[in-house]
Amino acid sequence: MTGPIAVTPVLFMSDGTEYDLPTVNVPASGVATVNVNNALSSAAAANAGSLANHLSQYGSASLRFSGVAPTVIAQTALGSPVRSLSYVARFTGILEGQPVSQTLEGLWWTRDAGMGGFVSLSNASGGVRNVSVQAITANGQAQPAQSFTLAPHAEQMLDLVTLVGRQLNAGEAGGLRIQFTGLEGEINVVGGLESQAGYSATMPFWMPPMTSMSASGIVLGHAGVMVGAPDAMMGFPAGTRFTPYLALRNLTAQVVPTSLILYTEQGTALPGPSQTLQPFESRQVDMSNLLQGLGMKDLNGMLTLAVGHTGQANDVIAAVGSADASGTYVFEVEGRTAEQGLSKQSPYWTVKDGSDTMVAVWNPTPAPEDVIVTLKYADSSGHYRFRVHLAAYATANLDVKELIADQSPDDEGNVIPSSKQEGSFVFQSAADVHAPLSLNVNVGIFNVLKGTCYYGTIWCDGYTGVTISPSSLTLPVPGNQQMNALGQYYDGTTPGVNAYTTWSSSNSSVASINPGGQVTAAGNGSATITATAKLPKYGQYSGYNPTCAALQIDQNYQAQAQVTVPACAVPTNYRQTSFYCASTTGVLSFNYTWDSSSGKIGDLASCTIQEVVRYDNNGVPPSPPFPNFTFPNPTVIPPNSSTRNGSSALLVDRHSPPSGSFVKPYSESTFNGSQDYQWNCACNGTGWTIFPGFQGIPIVRQVTKPTGTWEYKITKSSQSCTLVIPQ
Amino acid sequence: MIRATQFCIAMATLSALVGAAPAPSVSIVVSAPRPSILAGEPLFLTLTLKNMSTEKLLLRSDPDSFARVSVAPNGERTVWTAPPPEGDTGTFFKEVAPGEQETIKMVATETSRLTLPGQYRMTVEYVPLRASGVVDFNVQSFDEGALRARADAIHEAAVTLHDAEGGLNETALSTIEPEVARPFLCDVLKRKPDAVTTARKLEELADSDSIGCLIQVLPNSQGLQREVIIGALRTTMGRVQDDDLREKIGRALSGQR
């Protein structure tokens, strides 16, 4: 947004009791962070009487602000530095529509025997919701459902082991199915896994695939999976080594052959053994064995894991990350499909209090791609922007602390001041912020001292609406005007989107519009022009969906513009203003002028004015005595329609003698013509109309000898001009 | 000799502007929407005349107020000036305020006779005020197929575009060599009820096909177009030597007024 936004974080205790935290002002393009623990401590102290009975160890949060969602993007990090646990929860909106049966499918897995976990269900709606939870075995068998009733804004915390119904063994995987009837987003689900050793990971929950969608090749990219010893700059204790993990769950009733390909930072593909997932099956893949098989056992660095299958994006959930041997440090890497989209954002980076932020960007295409990464500062005071060139399938890994330490100026000469310790990211095509881009991004925010690591949520950029320029116009007939549909991009820019727009007019008899957006005035009145632009929607990369495309599909934004077509102006008061006789040439000239019915001569641009002269004897005067000359019959003046401009102020009419020499023997002779003055305005559709009093004006050309000298004489409108001809 | 005061004032203003100021009172910017033409194709011009004086000016808006000189790659010059007015003619003037400008579109009809391929430079002068502008254009080698396709496009524009633009294209088509343009001229006459320029061109060609087209269109023509076609057929009947053709024209006209 272009200005700060006041945001009130709202906490709901587990029983649904609301507690509003102090409002924070989030600067334009800036970031604000709120410590919930501190806020609750203050609340307990300040509201000992009223709130004390409702305070709980867990609950849910929402954000209250004015504007169009998602003007503010946010995420929640949950953690216990004492136990080096960390989880991520998202803010999701409630979609409009009719209440229907909703399902979320989750995946859990274990690293060690005796691991546990939690599933939190929070009711974001204002009504009571009944939620059923089912554990799904590794081979896809659904266990009996357990039902829970959630009061408005209430939260239910469930124990994973209890849900599964037994202790969990090392190396297991399984599923969870959450179902309720309501609107999408009304029940928020967060799941976490934990071990006594400190291993923690966020359980992914996805919406199941839609049967109506067609199958295609799907690649879930996981950019920047840490392998082996980390970069010394990251500050991990000596001897720390990371081993990747991978858990998969098939959300379909079909067998899904799934490919695994590891890509090096340079883009070299290392295909691993394919995994054939039985219906609803969950499994873990031994990544140590896989790396050994690929000869990468001793690799130190980053890899990108691509999990592929044919079907829909939500068919296969993948949980990917890396953990050190003790499980203290866990870098989770969220999987996202490798489709083409627009720019992307992540709401938070930090290097505060010993934290650091890693970014991995992967080019999932066979063509090189240039990406612009922008680090915005939390206080909205500036940014640091740099270009990253990605070869085909290559990954670039960036460390924010290193960037700050490096102090290299970007293309705009900016360096990151050491005082800037928080902010957000934008990832866009180097061609333009609005240009299509295929890019997988993963953000990891970690703190070696606390043993915590959160991944940053990624948000899909797009459009919030469309406008038309001009929004209103007055267009006389038969005028044309190009209309332009301008998309309202999330960042306030307004690129032209005519290529994605269809146009319509509420009244084509007043103003029609063609597929290219050109309006043509047709008749007096007003009409509403509607632009319908099919654009990617600006919205969250939902935690329940691995693809931007599913969120952005078929968003039809509409805008309207008013077209007023004024009454048709026509020429009036046509009149002769002067005349002139050139006695040396015998040319008789007249000046004519006229007015506009609207009072403005310029309004007659759609009008043409012409003269027509018709002659006796098909334009051939009697010769002798007239020259051997033929008048075009009828003569239309001016001869070409391109020069008959009604908005001109003056018409000078010239009547010349027939070209050539007069032919002897002379005799008294007359040649007659008849002249009309007429107008035609495209806006009134009546065709040619003769000006009143200007029809059939005689033009008389004579060879005469009134006083003993032969002369040529022309007479029109009671004015004459004579020329003495050779005697 | 009779003079009217009002007219004298108008003409005196124009005369003074022609003769008095050492620098032109108008500036001219010349551009060509299609600066690369085929040999045999005319060049369309767009002229923007801006009133650089402190007085209102009356500017002519017809092509005959301009003179043009095109210099070929070999230095050869092609000059076009307006023919002296004959018979009954009329000219529009438009009032242009100081600092305002007027756009005039025209067809440089003489350019369809340029045959030497290469880069040309044309100087266009607004004769009444001696102001000029320059435009460069390119003439490509003669290619009958390409010229026919271009003539087709021009003829379609003549038929479908609005009054002024349609008129410009009609003029342009009439300058293309008859072997290429004739069928398109005939189609314009059939489809464009106010195609006076085209009727005159067919009258000027006066060959069997052109006259045949006039005869063919006559029964369905109306209004002024009908008058023009009848006038053209009467004129050509007095010119053609071919008895069969004369008889054909006679039969066509006998059924008319």
Image: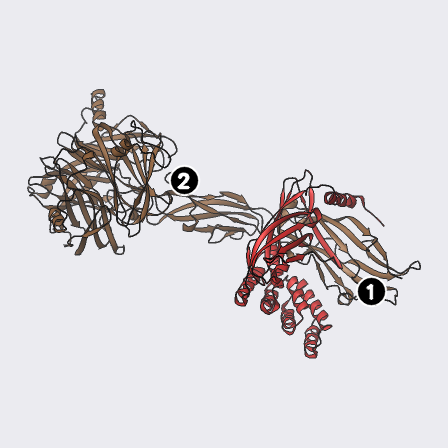
Chain colours: A brown, B red
Q: Does A478 sit left or right of A168 as displayed?
A: right
Q: As shown in the figure, which amino acid type bears the numbered disc 2?
A: Thr
Q: As shown in the figure, which amino acid type bears the numbered disc 1?
A: Phe
Q: Chain of mark 1?
A: A
Residue under the point 41% across and 40% down: A493
For residue A222, which quarter of the picture?
A: top left
Residue under the point 12% across and 40% down: A160
| Above/below status of A456 relative to B209 | above
**Horizontal and vertical percent for residue A310?**
23, 56
From the image, tell me which residue sits under label 1: A626
Residues tagged 2 and 1 counted as in contact (Cβ below 8 A): no
| Above/below status of B220 relative to B77 | below
Q: Residue furthest front?
A: B74
Q: Nearer the viewer, residue A216 or A90?
A: A216
Give the crowd class for mark 1: few <14, some 14-19, many >=20 residues within 10 Å.
Answer: many
For residue A166, which quarter of the picture?
A: top left
Considering the numbered disc 1 on the image, is that residue within a helix, a strand or a loop?
A: loop
| Foreground: disc 2 or disc 1 | 1
Counting residues from the N terminus, which is met first, the one under dot 2 or under dot 1? 2
Q: Chain of mark 2?
A: A
Q: Nearer the viewer, residue A78 or A149?
A: A78
Residue under the point 81% across and 59% down: A700
Work out which quarter of the rendered image holds the C terminus of chain A and state it: bottom right
Give the crowd class for mark 2: few <14, some 14-19, many >=20 residues within 10 Å.
Answer: few
| Above/below status of B140 relative to A199 | below
From the image, tell me which residue sits under label 2: A493
**Horizontal and vertical percent for residue B78?**
65, 58
Q: Nearer the viewer, residue A52 or A610?
A: A610
